[in-house]
Amino acid sequence: MSTLPRRRLLAATGAALTGAIAGCSSDDGEDEDESENEAAENDDESPDEGETGSSTEVDGTILGEITVNNSDDTSHAVDVIVEFDREIEAWKTESLEANEDVTLERNWPTDPGQFRVTARLDQEELVEVTPAKWNEPNCLNLLVRIDSSGTLTIPGTTDGGPCSDGDADSDAEE
């Protein structure tokens, strides 16, 4: 019989603690819900302010050309992986002789989106870039470059190729 009162005591204590904890957490939850609702209302107001030229109007970046350049005096193999919205759109392995360039066939979406380009030199470490590195431009061309010391880098440019606005073509003809 001595176990029955102890069980009742534990059950009563557990119920009291559960009630106290639930009461405290519900008060905190209401405060959090109110602050979340206020933040959501503030977010809803932002588009109505008519911001022009801001990066919030862009639904992503257009991935233009990707050129692979081997400026080293030795041959190298480069893997280039293009992902849009976390899905692989293109995976190309290029074997380049010394001082050779190759522009990849554009097998990825031509519409703006969220993308990541990952490159790997000779089955070694991966180098990854996203448009955020260039402050989310409207369009971005990439150069997967092997320098003369055999180091892989991925610089980018926002003009030329598919990123041209028509003026680059006339400049090239001059």
Image (cartoon, grey):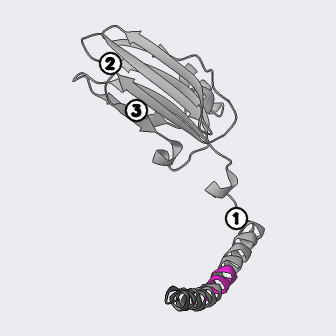
The residue closer to the viewer here, 170 or 48, is 48
Q: Amino acid at mark 1?
A: Glu
The residue closer to the viewer here, 59 or 171, is 59
Q: Residue 4 at x, y = what percent?
A: 55, 87
Q: Is residue 141 rendered to the left or right of residue 73?
A: right
Disc 3 to disc 2, C-alpha distance: 15 Å
Which of label 2 and label 1 is nearer to you? 2
Q: What number is the disc on residue 122? A: 2
Q: Amino acid at mark 2?
A: Asp
How many numbered circles does the render carry? 3
Q: Which residue is mark 1?
A: 51
Look at the picture and state if 74 lies above or below 23: above
Look at the picture and state if 58 lies above or below 121: below
Look at the picture and state if 109 lies above or below 6: above
Return the residue found at the far top: 97
Please rate how many residues cluster around mark 1, counting C-alpha atoms within 10 Å: few if below 14, some from 14 to 19, many from 20: few
